[in-house]
Image (tube, rainbow, N blue to C red):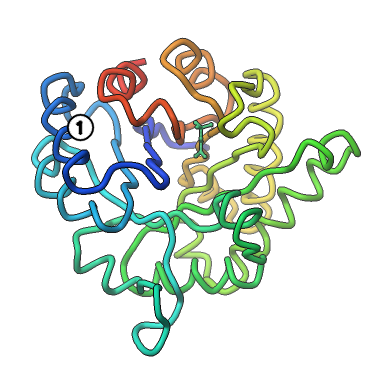
Amino acid sequence: MDRVRTPVIAGNWKMHKGPEAARKFSREFAQVAPPTGSRTLILFPPSLSVTTVRDALGGHGVAVGVQNLYWETEGAFTGELSAPMAREAGARYALVGHSERRHVFGETDPETARKVEAAAGAGLVPVLCVGETIEERRAGRLEEVILRQLDAGLERVDDDVAAAMLVAYEPVWAIGTGETATPDDAADAHGLLRSRLRDRLGDRAGDVPILYGGSVKPANAAELLAASDVDGVLVGGASLDPRDFAKIAAA
Ligand code: PGA
């Protein structure tokens, strides 16, 4: 049986908001944030703003994560950051395999698997993102693509880690486009992911929150959160405005 979960409301700022803008957001969000405890709130700022948001909003029940990391611990990897460094800076979560990593930067399934492993190894909670492109959806390949990404992402971790992670279903065609999956579309994809998790984890599959992402706004958050197997949302554009993000958190 699935346990009752606190809805997860996560904001991915992408390449927006350096420390100054992050401070301003945090000041404003602190005024309008929902009561702590009713929601699991997570923000993924750019790495340069992680400590700022941690310091400003940690006391308001907001956890912080990084948007990406490299699997090595340290070394000659110019431009990269490691999971232990992210942990030390106060991150508790790590996005892995976001569609922009996959499609803009060419990140592969095996690389995603290594990042999941590295994040978990450093005590971060991986948030594995999966999602199909519009061409894949039209070709009837939704199931094949998202289950392949899920299986691949979990390949290098054991069941205890897999049961403690989060998964985010983010159809690529809905990201930043204003086009949202319907609650039924989301429920269908989330059902497929849940059943694949159940094949591997049995009852513990119910412990894995599956978030929906892709043009989530204050106006559509409640109906998406009400859809079957949707345990939270991963919000891009609308998480940049403290009032909009607070409205989604209260949905
Ligand atoms: P969006 O982005 O809400 O701007 O569509 C979602 C995401 O990429 O996580």
Q: In this view, does 20 lie above or below 28?
A: below
- Residue in view at x 40 percent, y 80 percent: 78
- Residue in view at x 59 percent, y 24 percent: 228
Q: In this view, does 14 lie to the left or right of 224?
A: left
Residue 70 location, quadrant: bottom left
Q: Is residue 232 visible?
A: no
Q: Is residue 117 visible?
A: yes
Whole-percent x, y for residue 225 in the image: 48, 22
Q: Which amino acid does label 1 sit on?
A: Phe
Whole-percent x, y for residue 75 in the image: 36, 89
Q: In this view, does 198 lie to the left or right of 90?
A: right
Task: Between residue 16 and residue 108, name the one nearer to us.
Answer: 16
- The residue singled out by tag 1 in the image is 25
- Residue in view at x 68 percent, y 19 percent: 184
Q: Quadrant of the C terminus?
A: top left
Whole-percent x, y for residue 227 in the image: 57, 20
- Is ligand 1 within 8 Å of the beta carbon of the residue shown at mark 1? no
Q: Is residue 152 above or below residue 188?
A: below
